[in-house]
Structures are given as structure tokens and as C-alpha cells.
Amino acid sequence: MFLRSSPSATTRSRSLIKTLTWRVLATSDTFAIGYLVTGNVAWAGSIAGIEVATKLVAYYFHERAWSRVKWGRADTTVEAAG
């Protein structure tokens, strides 16, 4: 008998947490670059705010799409004892 993990080993909650932690890092980077380019905290904040709104949604759907791709995953089939 063989046991197999689900076709999508990445849960939706894991994707959501990864999305949120990535956004904190990426938005901090965008804010810093915006400030370096403009020299203005308000402009940098505006740029980072817009970026959060668009990229948060885009990343979540990107992550969910990749969770369906089987390419590049290790085979997780194991033989059950007994």
C-alpha cells in the first residue's frame, strides 16, 4: 500500500502567511527605494502603499498557481508498513 500526500502540499493558510511576511519585507524595500529616489517620506509612503495593494493580491494568486505545478517537487510517495 502506498500513501501519497495531497496534490497540493501547500495549504492556503501557509500561502497567506508567506504572502504577508513577504509583503512586509518587499514593502520596506520599496519604501526605502522610494525615499532614496524622491527624498520625500510622503511620496515614498504613497509609492509603498500602492505597491502593497497590487502586489499582495498578485503574489497570493501566483503562490496558489505554483502550488498546482508538479514540476520540481520531490516525490513524496512512501510505502506504508504493515
Image: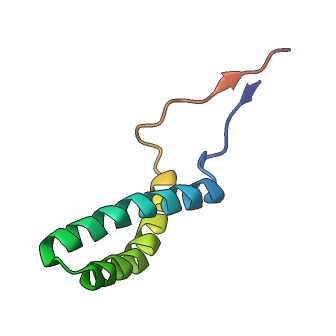
* Tag count: 0
| Residue 36 on image: x %, y % | 16, 69
The extreme right residue here reads 82
Quarter of the picture containing the N terminus is top right
Q: Residue at x 41, y 42 (%)?
A: 71
The residue located at (47%, 58%) in the rendering is: 63
- Residue 61 horizontal/vertical position (percent): 47, 67
Is residue 68 in view from this perspective? no
| Left or right of residue 24: residue 48 | left
Query: On the image, which quarter does residue 17 sit in?
Result: bottom right
Residue at (77% x, 20% y) in the render: 80
- In the shown orientation, is residue 51 left or right of residue 12? left
Q: Is residue 33 visible?
A: yes
Q: Determine the residue located farthest toward the top in the rendered image.
A: 82
Q: Is 52 located above or below residue 20 in the figure? A: below
Looking at this view, is 31 or 52 the one in front?
31
Q: Is residue 18 above or below residue 4?
A: below
| Closer to the camera in the image, 34 or 60 | 34
Residue in front for this viewpoint, 18 or 2 = 18
| Horizontal side, residue 67 vs residue 55: left or right | right
Quarter holding residue 33: bottom left
The quadrant of the image that shows the C terminus is top right
Q: Is residue 82 left or right of residue 64?
A: right
Is residue 52 positioned above or below 24 on the image? below
Counting from the top left corner in percent of width and height, residue 50 is at 35, 82
Residue 68 percent location from the top left of the image: 51, 54
Colour scheme of the rendered structure: rainbow
